[in-house]
């Protein structure tokens, strides 16, 4: 539902009607909204806020007043920076920032200790944001279509990470730190510049590895339980004695938002690597993928 632009500090048209339904949820996506109105930040009981594709250019520091917020969608906007106030949302578990103009994350981003799902694809990140290394609860990290060339050696500190999407970056060599990510379930390195792979057997929990559109001559060595997507993958999986595993089904994440993130990664959910193209809302909200 589109929301027309209103006075700078008032609730946009239609917002009050949504709130009267009794749900602590506000959908402002699709309208014209360059700045989040102050009245929205005053909704202290709000739990879900969607402001996708509105042309949003800035967020007020007062966003920190949304102390009960669990889900915040700011994808497909024009944000160049995030206020420190966003880093002070103690209950935030899902944050969608894809398709903006971000060059970095605030140092205080590490305060988001409840965050379990971060989608920041389609921005201008040249370096892996170091505050993420301190997010112990983070399980899904979507960083596709950025400008990354390397990953920090400290990446294995992120012991909760189960799904990592790095497609469409600028990796020329397989990042060594990934070999110490033994708890990863999903790894997506599509559309990079990789010419080969090491033996990936150290990734004992891996279930899906996608490496399509890289200048490689064949698939990596992986356990027979790994579903491969890329050059030579079908032939490699056909050689296995066991039946070829089926790709995870595609599911829209809006229907999954109330489910536990651990269940999503440990169940039969879909993967971006096998789902619809990135850049649209359904793709953004694709479930993080399969697991144990």
Image (cartoon, rainbow, N blue to C red):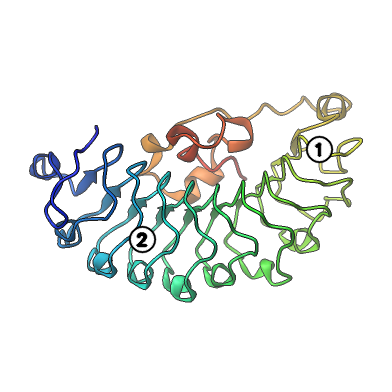
Camera-side residue of 149 and 35: 35
Q: Are marks 1 and 2 in contact (CB under 8 Å)?
A: no
Residue 277: which quarter of the image? top right
Camera-side residue of 149 and 152: 149
Q: Secondary structure at mark 2?
A: loop
Real-space Cα separation, disc 1 to disc 2, in angstroms: 37 Å
Classify mark 2: residues with Cα within 10 Å, few (<14), some (14-19) or many (20+). many
In the image, residue 241 above or below residue 256: above
Q: Residue at x 46, y 50 (%)?
A: 261
Q: Secondary structure at mark 1?
A: loop
Q: Residue at x 37, y 68 (%)?
A: 83
Which mark lies nearer to you, 1 or 2?
2
Q: Dot 2 corresponds to which residue? A: 92
In the image, residue 291 above or below residue 237: below
Residue 224: image tag:
1
Mark 1 or mark 2, earlier in chain: 2
Residue 275: which quarter of the image? top right
Residue 224, image x, y percentages: 81, 37
Q: Residue at x 88, y 52 (%)?
A: 198
Camera-side residue of 149 and 94: 149
Residue 15, image x, y percentages: 14, 43
Q: Quadrant of the C terminus?
A: top right
Residue 257, image x, y percentages: 37, 43
In the visual, does 117 lie left or right of 178?
left
Q: Quadrant of the N terminus?
A: top left
């Amino acid at each position: 539902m589109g929301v027309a632009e209103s006075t700078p500090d008032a609730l946009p048209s239609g917002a009050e009607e949504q709130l009267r339904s009794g749900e602590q949820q506000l959908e402002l996506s699709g309208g014209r909204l360059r700045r989040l109105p102050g009245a929205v930040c005053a909704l202290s009981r709000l739990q879900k806020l969607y402001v996708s594709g509105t042309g949003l250019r800035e967020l007020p520091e007062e966003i920190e007043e949304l102390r009960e917020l669990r889900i915040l969608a700011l994808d497909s906007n024009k944000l160049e920076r995030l206020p420190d106030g966003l880093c002070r949302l103690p209950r935030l578990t899902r944050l969608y920032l894809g398709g903006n103009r971000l060059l970095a994350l605030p140092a205080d981003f590490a305060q988001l200790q409840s965050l379990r799902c971060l989608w920041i694809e389609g921005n201008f990140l040249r370096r892996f944001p170091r505050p993420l290394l301190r997010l112990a609860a983070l399980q899904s990290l979507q960083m596709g279509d950025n400008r990354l060339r390397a990953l920090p050696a400290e990446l294995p500190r992120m012991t909760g990470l189960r799904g990592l999407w790095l497609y469409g970056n600028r990796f020329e060599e397989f990042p060594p730190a990934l070999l110490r990510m033994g708890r990863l379930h999903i790894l997506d390195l599509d559309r990079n510049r990789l010419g080969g792979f090491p033996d990936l057997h150290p990734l004992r929990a891996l279930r899906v590895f996608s490496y399509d559109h890289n200048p490689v001559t064949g698939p990596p060595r992986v356990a027979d339980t790994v579903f491969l997507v890329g050059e030579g993958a079908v032939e490699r999986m056909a050689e296995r004695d066991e039946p070829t595993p089926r790709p995870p089904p595609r599911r829209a994440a809006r229907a999954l938002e109330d489910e536990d993130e651990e269940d999503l990664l440990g169940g039969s959910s879909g993967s971006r690597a096998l789902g619809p193209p990135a850049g649209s809302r359904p793709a953004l909200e694709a479930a993080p993928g399969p697991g144990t």
